[in-house]
Amino acid sequence: MLMMETIGCSDLNSTKSFTVLLGTLTNKLYFVYNPREPVTLQTEHGFLVKAGNDEVCQLGTADDMTEIVFHKVVRMNSNAITNLPIPTLPHEAASNLYVDGNSRKILNGYISPLRSQGSRNNINAGFIASANLQLGNNYKLSNQNQNQSKTNWKSV
């Protein structure tokens, strides 16, 4: 038969709270009765979660107590990442709305001369460009060459 010991408080109401100190007054687990509020873990130097001897994630670091560090893969289980701020550094994540709303560099490259096979002696050279058919919010008509001459475009 399994014996289970319980520590805590089973009669919380709006006038009571419950705290378990973890070495100091600033390292504690506490709960204030409010049906919509979570249990709070407050620590002075962050909180490290381990599975076995492997570090999984850390809440708060020596450099930034509001930083969350994941040491393992984060599996989203088909859930979205929301509320991304506008990126300010190149390595920061951006929302789809932000990316689609900004003008972007078109990837292109030079096509070396190509000769057709068979009896024809066609030589085609030029540039290949890849672009999205959707225009970003920052697209301006001035981006177009307004004095375009008629050009015969070839697919290669």
Image (cartoon, rainbow, N blue to C red):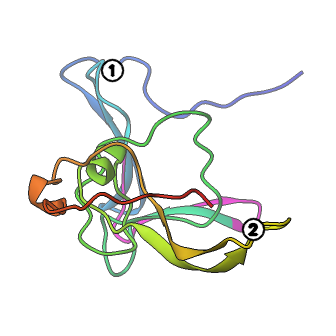
Q: Is residue 94 visible?
A: yes
| Identity of the residue drawn at 9% across and 60% down | 142
- Which element is circle 1 on? loop
Picture disc at residue 128: none
Residue 49 counted in the magenta span: yes
Is the residue marked by circle 2 packed among few (<14), some (14-19), or many (20+) residues within 10 Å?
A: few
Q: Is residue 26 left or right of residue 125?
A: left
Query: Dot 1: few (<14), some (14–19), or many (≥20) neighbours within 10 Å?
Result: some
Measured as percent of width and height from the top left, residue 36 is found at: 29, 21
Q: Amino acid at mark 2?
A: Asn
Q: Nearer the viewer, residue 40 or 128?
A: 128
The numbered mark, 2 or 1, whose residue comes first in the sequence reads 1
> Which residue is found at the position 90% from the left and 21% from the top?
1
In the shown orientation, is residue 111 left or right of residue 10?
right
Vertical relation: 115 (above or below) 81: below
The local secondary structure at tag 2 comes to loop
- Residue with the mark numbered 1: 12
Would residue 104 be found to the left or right of residue 61 on screen? left
Q: Can you tell which quarter of the image residue 73 is in?
A: bottom right
Q: Is residue 38 left or right of residue 50?
A: left
Residue 58 x/y as whole percent: 50, 64
State the image coordinates of residue 50 (x, y, percent, origin top left): 65, 61
Q: How many marks?
A: 2
The magenta region covers 41-54
Q: Amino acid at mark 1?
A: Leu
**Mark-to-mark CA distance, 2 and 1:** 36 Å
Res. 48 visible in picture: no
Screen quadrant of the C terminus: bottom right
Nearer to us: label 2 or label 1: 2
Which residue is label 2 attached to?
53
